Image (cartoon, rainbow, N blue to C red):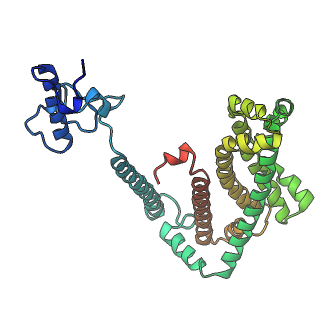
Amino acid sequence: MTQRDPSRGPAPGDDEAVDRQRQARDLHRVEAGGGDDLPAGYRTAGLDTSTRPDPGAPAVSTAQRGATGRKTSTGQARAVRQRRRTWTNRLLGVAGMLLFLVAWELLPVLGVVDERFMPPASAAIADLLEKFTDQVFWVAVWDTMRAWAIGMVIAVVSAAILGFIIGSSNFLRKATNSTIEFLRPVPSVALIPLAVLIFGVGIESALLLIVYASFWQVLIQVLYGVADVDSVAMDTAKSYGLGMVNRIRYVIFPTALPYLMTGIRLAAAVALILAITAQLIIGTPGLGAEIARAQSGGAYVSMYSLVLATGLLGVIINMVVRAVERRILSWHTSVRSEVK
């Protein structure tokens, strides 16, 4: 007995097969854009016949709602919402800055503080704009940025190398843990007398403070990153015969890189703070020394404008470091999920 060819349709008298064929044809009409006379439950395109909801089911299926029971959005709609949140956050940041400047402007005007010692924000901003054409100001900015950059390079390179070496050895981690925990809380400003005795008032004194403060920010993050390496990945690398250098390169480094970038971002801000502090207290050339000179000479408007300049430097440094971080970690989930 030969079987009937399915391509010829259902056999005569087979009501069940005829009904299945009619349902399949109706579903095809829905996905093609038609089918206005069908029940609401069939108006969900993109699902195959086996997962099509019943006629009495709601217009949005469980697969469309997602695990939370809410409607899931397409990538385009989600990107639009993310861009809106980004602009909202930026506007809130600008509004907060404007609110701060308005409060600063009103405090001396209303007599809350003495205008001689705290001039209005408008006066400080105007003086800062004038300084943009002053060569002495740019020389001070260069001295500050030079100390910051040299200190950052020394701190990041030394801390990254030591962090990978110490973190890759259980013996070294245990042997250095007490020493690190003892030295890390020591404030860098406590080393100012030592720096002056050894190096005087030169840039070397500022570098000592910058390197000491920034070093621990990077080292601790690298140690955390190395400790976060998957043990299964390390065992697999060992089973394939990878040596210590290759394990650090292909297994440890990719895992610790996000931690390293976080340490660099933190160290960048700390390095600028210590650079200004060293110049302010020790007298090393830079913006800090200019602030101290303006304060001692009673030029308070100039002093506040220089303080604003240090704040602008901090914002610029943070923006640059964040841009580099996003560029380097574009493959990482923490950056891919960020709103750009």
Query: How many labels sit on residues?
Result: 0
Q: Nearer the viewer, residue 302 or 53?
A: 53
Q: Residue 56: which quarter of the image?
A: top left
Query: Vertically, is 100 above or below 247?
Result: below
Residue ID at (81%, 50%): 158
- Percent x, y for residue 31? 21, 41
In the picture provided, is 63 more to the left or to the right than 213? Answer: left
In the picture provided, is 48 more to the left or to the right than 179? Answer: left
- Percent x, y for residue 115? 52, 66
Q: Residue 117: which quarter of the image?
A: bottom right
Residue 186 visible in image: no
Q: Nearer the viewer, residue 104 or 87?
A: 87
In the picture provided, is 122 more to the left or to the right than 251? Answer: left
Q: Residue 16: which quarter of the image?
A: top left
- Percent x, y for residue 73? 32, 42
In the displayed orientation, state which residue is furthest to the left.
37
Residue 32 visible in image: yes
In the displayed orientation, state which residue is furthest to the top.
1
Query: Vertically, is 35 above or below 142?
Result: above
- Percent x, y for residue 133? 60, 82
Residue ID at (54%, 70%): 124
In the displayed orientation, state which residue is furthest to the right.
198
Residue ID at (25%, 30%): 49
Query: Vertically, is 247 above or below 301?
Result: above
Q: Quadrant of the N terminus?
A: top left
